[in-house]
Each structure stands twice: as C-alpha cells, then as structure tokens.
Image (cartoon, helix red, strand yellow):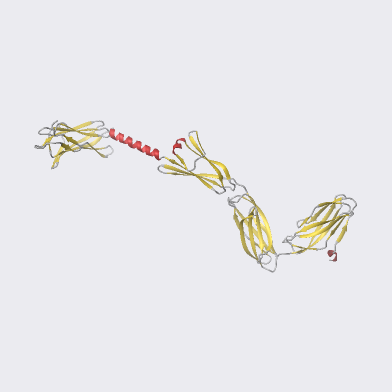
C-alpha cells in the first residue's frame, strides 16, 4: 500500500515517466490525471503515447517531440462509465521512442467511486433506419445495481431533430434491488417528420429532480418522394363531374410538377374547369389539359375539379326531336276535312262533306266517323256515299259512319244534306266532326275537323 501511495519513477535509457499514486475517480465525471514525461537523452526525440484499456481515458496528445533534457506534463482525462464497479482499476500507460525504438509501460491505479446505483444501461430500437408511415419502438432499459434498496425514478424520453424536441414521453418507474426495468414507447413516423438523423435522449432523475444519468441513441428517417393521383367520376343527367385528387405521400415537398388529363376532342366545348389548366393541346383526336402544381407539402392533398356539361346539347337535341315529331305528326297524321256547298236559307239544300285521308304508312282499322246536325237544320235522307247510322236527339241529329279499315294514303268521303227548318233564317254553325280509329298496336286515336259556319244570307 505504501508503494501505491507514493510516486514511482521508472527510467529508461532516454525517457522518464512519473505517474501519481492511486487516484480516486468518480463514475460519469471527468477526472483529470497528470503524467510527467522527460526526455533524458541529450538529443531531440519523438515519443508516442497510448493507454490501455482505451475506453475510459482520453490523452491530451498522443505524440510529442522533446528536446534533450526537456520535460512536459501530459493530461489524461478519465470518465468511468456509470455501470463500472467500485474498486481498483489498473490502466497501462505506454511511451515509445521513435529514435531508439524503446518502449516503457507504466501502470495507473484508479480507485473507482460510484455516483449512482441506478443508470440507463441501453436504449433498444426496433429499427435504426425507417421509412415514413412506419413505427419505431423505443425501449430504454433502467438498471438498479443496489442489492438492498428499491429505487423510485423519473424517466424522460425525448426525440429530437436539430436540437428541437419532436416527441416526448414521461414515466415514473419503481425498480427493485439488483434488477432492471424496460420501458417501451411507440413513435409513429408521419409524412410530416422530415428525413434525416434523429436523436433519442433518455434522462434519468431521482425524486428530487436531480439528474442521475443520461444516454443517447440515434435513428434515421429515409427520404421518400411519392406523389399519387386518383380520379372520381360522377355521372348525372345533364353533366359529368370529375375530381382528380393529387396527394403527396412522401416526406419531401413536391415542387413544380404537372398533372394531365386526356379527353376526346369533341368534349372541348363542354369542358368547365374549377381551376384553369395552364395548357391545352390536341393530339390524335384527343385534347390534353395540363395543370401546374407549384408545391405540395408532405401529406397534403390537392383537388382538381371539372365538369362536362351537356345541357345545351341535350336541350337542343330534345328541341330537334320535338320539332321533328311535330312535323311528322302534321304531315303523316290522318286528316279530317269538313266542307259545305250551298246557302242556308229557305228551301235550299246544303251539301256537307267529310273528307278523310290516311297519311300514315300503315293501315288503320275500326274507323268511326261522327258528325252532328243542330236542331235548327233538317237532315235530308239522301247520301252520295256510305249511308250513316242516324240517331235523333232533342238538340239535333247524330250521324255515325263505320269503316272496317282504310289503307295507307287512301281517302274516303262521307256526305249528307241539310236544309233550314221553315221560318229559320241566318247563319248556321256546324260543330266539329270526329274521326276515331285503332292503330296497329291497338291504341285508339281521335282526329277532329274544324267547325263550320254556313252562311244564310244571299250572295
């Protein structure tokens, strides 16, 4: 013990090393030790230094050039890890001469004193390199090496990017003697977490908020560039609505990129965009619209909307169809014409004719023609064509003709005669005559003539 407490001098032919005796050092604290090195030779020499084991200590320098008889003080900084056991630790300090190639080794005796019985032994990570939308599992392990006392401690786990706290977890932990405790936390990597290196810092404190130990670990988030496009189409009666969704699913900002949409060239007249495209051009009977997206942040979604409106076209087509139908109906619909010959006066007879022409392209069946003679006129039972069925009423006389069928473009004429009742003068109004028939599909239709006014005055 006496030898350990006093400086020991070791001499070589050209170097002399003086180390202190046993030195007290404390875990996780910086402990400075001074070593004297002297060139005992007469000429300048270069010396190299090394320390073993090298994990604890850091030399002020690892080589030096000394003139003859020159002496320097070399500083050694020793920081024992927190998990180091208490007791004497022996280190070897070696000096080598470049000129003589001689080597001298001197032992250092360090008496280790513990500053805490509890520490962070490790920080386990599920992965060290991750992509966006993955989950990192962080598991700090706290160890209590005191064999008799339970420890109550606070554990803070911080995730930092460029010294800024991104996420933080706080835990209160009770650890039994001579045991360890593992804490687990999940950190979800979102698209908003920028790529690069992240630091995990775990801080261990006692119940008085005193820091007992700190430990760090690191992980990396990869750079991912990913822009996805989707399209939703909704068809309505008179228009189609289209929504193009552009989403940045990477963790880098997407800048100055284009979104294109190809449509048939005829749709150009019906195209109504919510955001005007920067370019439209026609290629191979298709029109290509181009939108410029200046920037899109990670996780951001942009919607491009447009409509194809066919209202005007549909309304125009309907108008054409209606007009065409009216024209066809007018020119191809069966027509009933009612005419007369003569004057309604005295004993003169008036001849009334009903002319029907089948303008349809197909035969019509079960034809019924009806007309009515008011009571102020007398029906003369003389007929030039088909004889009708006569039905007399108080208000007048009803005439009915029945025909089984009329061929396309065939014309039929039905006539009858009337004259005024004695003592009646003036004009006579004859009502409309009607023509009813049955189509090929069994539907019944009716055609009416115009009403007539038969003059009763002398021409």
> Residue 94's spot in the image, x, y percent?
83, 55
> Residue 336's spot in the image, x, y percent?
22, 34
Looking at the image, residue 158 sits to the left or right of residue 449; the answer is right
Q: Quadrant of the N terminus?
A: bottom right
How many numbered tags mark residues here? 0
Looking at the image, residue 255 sits to the left or right of residue 262; the answer is right
The extreme left residue here reads 422
> Residue 255's spot in the image, x, y percent?
58, 43
Looking at the image, residue 425 sits to the left or right of residue 448; the answer is left
The extreme right residue here reads 42
Q: Quadrant of the C terminus?
A: top left
Give whichever of 105, 42 is nearer the camera: 42
> Residue 384's spot in the image, x, y percent?
15, 31
Above or below 125: residue 392:
above
Quarter of the rendering containing residue 266:
top left
Q: Residue at x 87, y 54 (%)?
A: 70
Above or below 253: residue 210:
below
């Amino acid at each position: 013990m006496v030898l350990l407490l006093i400086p020991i001098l070791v001499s070589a032919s050209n170097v002399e090393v003086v180390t202190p005796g046993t030195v007290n050092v404390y875990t996780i604290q910086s402990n400075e030790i001074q070593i004297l090195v002297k060139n005992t030779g007469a000429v300048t020499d270069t010396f190299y230094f090394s320390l073993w084991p090298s994990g604890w200590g850091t030399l002020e320098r690892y080589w030096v050039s000394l003139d003859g008889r020159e002496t320097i003080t070399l500083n050694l900084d020793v920081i024992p890890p927190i998990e180091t056991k208490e007791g004497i630790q022996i280190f070897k300090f070696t000096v080598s001469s470049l000129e003589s190639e001689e080597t001298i080794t001197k032992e250092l005796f360090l008496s280790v004193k513990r500053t805490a019985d509890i520490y962070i032994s490790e920080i386990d990570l599920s992965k060290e390199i991750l992509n966006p939308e993955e989950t990192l599992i962080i598991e700090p392990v706290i160890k209590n090496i005191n064999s008799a006392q339970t420890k109550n401690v606070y554990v803070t786990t911080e995730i930092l990017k460029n010294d800024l706290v991104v996420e933080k977890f706080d835990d209160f932990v009770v650890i039994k003697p001579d045991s360890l405790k593992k804490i687990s936390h999940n950190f979800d990597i979102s698209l908003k977490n920028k790529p690069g290196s992240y630091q995990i810092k775990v801080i261990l404190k006692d119940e008085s908020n005193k820091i007992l130990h700190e430990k760090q670990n690191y992980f990396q988030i990869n750079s991912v560039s990913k822009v996805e496009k989707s399209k939703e189409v909704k068809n309505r009666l008179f228009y189609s609505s289209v929504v193009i969704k552009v989403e940045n699913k990477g963790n880098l900002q997407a800048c100055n990129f284009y979104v294109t949409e190809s449509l048939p060239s005829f749709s150009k007249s019906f195209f109504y965009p919510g955001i005007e495209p920067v370019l439209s051009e026609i290629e191979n009977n298709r029109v290509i619209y181009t939108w410029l997206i200046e920037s899109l942040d990670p996780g951001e979604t942009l919607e491009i909307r447009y409509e194809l409106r066919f209202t005007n076209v549909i309304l125009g087509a309907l108008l054409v169809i209606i007009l065409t139908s009216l024209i066809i109906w007018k020119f191809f619909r069966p027509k009933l014409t009612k005419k007369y010959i003569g004057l309604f006066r005295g004993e003169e007879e008036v001849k009334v004719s009903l002319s029907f022409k089948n303008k349809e392209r197909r035969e019509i069946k079960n034809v019924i023609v009806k007309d009515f003679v008011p009571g102020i006129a007398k029906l003369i039972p003389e007929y030039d064509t088909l004889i009708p069925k006569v039905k007399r009423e108080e208000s007048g006389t009803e005439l009915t003709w029945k025909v089984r069928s009329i061929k396309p473009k065939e014309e039929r004429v039905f006539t009858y005669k009337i004259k005024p009742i004695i003592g009646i003068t003036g004009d006579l109004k004859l009502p409309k005559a009607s023509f009813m028939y049955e189509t090929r599909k069994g539907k019944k239709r009716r055609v009416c003539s115009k009403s007539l006014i038969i003059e009763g005055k002398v021409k």
